[in-house]
Image (cartoon, rainbow, N blue to C red):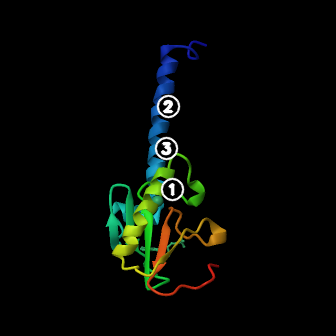
Amino acid sequence: NFLLNSPVSDAIISMKNIRSRDYFAAKVRKNKMDCLFCEIIAGNIPSNKLYEDDRVLAFYDINPQAPVHFLVIPKAHIASADAITADNAETVAYIFSLIPALAAKAGLTGGYRVITNCRPDACQSVPHLHFHVLGGAQLADRMA
Ligand code: AMP
Ligand code: ZN
């Protein structure tokens, strides 16, 4: 079959690859836009920002669980703590390197708690990695 091994078949295969690449890129874009925090990062949904740079956004939680409650998120979509890998751990370390200054900026002079809820048992409700920073009062002794 001349189609199996010919410049024509190569061309057909590469056209298919281009199409499927575009298809997957569109799918990734769509999924990102299905994500509430990606929408906030894109500026499509407003947020009360505490800090922003090219890799990280920190904004106040809409339903605060403490007198001060903000979220720190990577701009790159990472689904949860379960999706932290050697490839994206640098971003996570960067987030933690910012937290002391963000806590100070938010007035958390007495200390604070950092939490990430991972998947259903922990009641993760937004599937984009986020670290809750809570404080501004004496917090409960128990964590769960
Ligand atoms: P989790 O339940 O750990 O996934 O945390 C998600 C957090 O996002 C909750 O504390 C919500 O109150 C918060 N949240 C949901 N929508 C918004 C929003 N539009 N702006 C700020 N925080 C939000
Ligand atoms: Zn996202």
Q: Is mark 3 within 8 Å of ligand 2?
A: no
Q: Is the residue 22 above or below the residue 144 in the image?
A: above
> Residue at left 43%, top 56%?
94
Q: Is the residue 40 above or below the residue 82 in the image?
A: below
Mark 1 and mark 2: span between their CA atoms?
A: 29 Å
Q: According to the image, label 1 marks what residue?
A: 78
Q: According to the image, label 3 marks what residue?
A: 24
Q: Which secondary structure lies at badge 3?
A: helix
> Does 37 sit left or right of 84 as displayed?
left
> Residue at left 63%, top 82%?
142
Q: According to the image, label 2 marks what residue?
A: 16
Q: Which secondary structure lies at badge 2?
A: helix
Q: Residues within 10 Å of mark 1 (few under 14, many from 20)?
A: some
Q: Amino acid at mark 3?
A: Phe
Query: Which percent across, then down, holds residue 45?
Result: 36, 69
Q: Earlier in the sequence, mark 3 or mark 2?
A: 2
Residue 82: which quarter of the image?
bottom right
Q: Is the residue 57 above or below the residue 89 in the image?
A: below
> Which of label 1 and label 3 is nearer to you?
1
> Which of label 3 and label 2 is nearer to you?
3
Q: Is mark 1 within 8 Å of ligand 2?
A: yes
> Residue at left 34%, top 74%?
105
Q: Residues within 10 Å of mark 2 (few under 14, many from 20)?
A: few
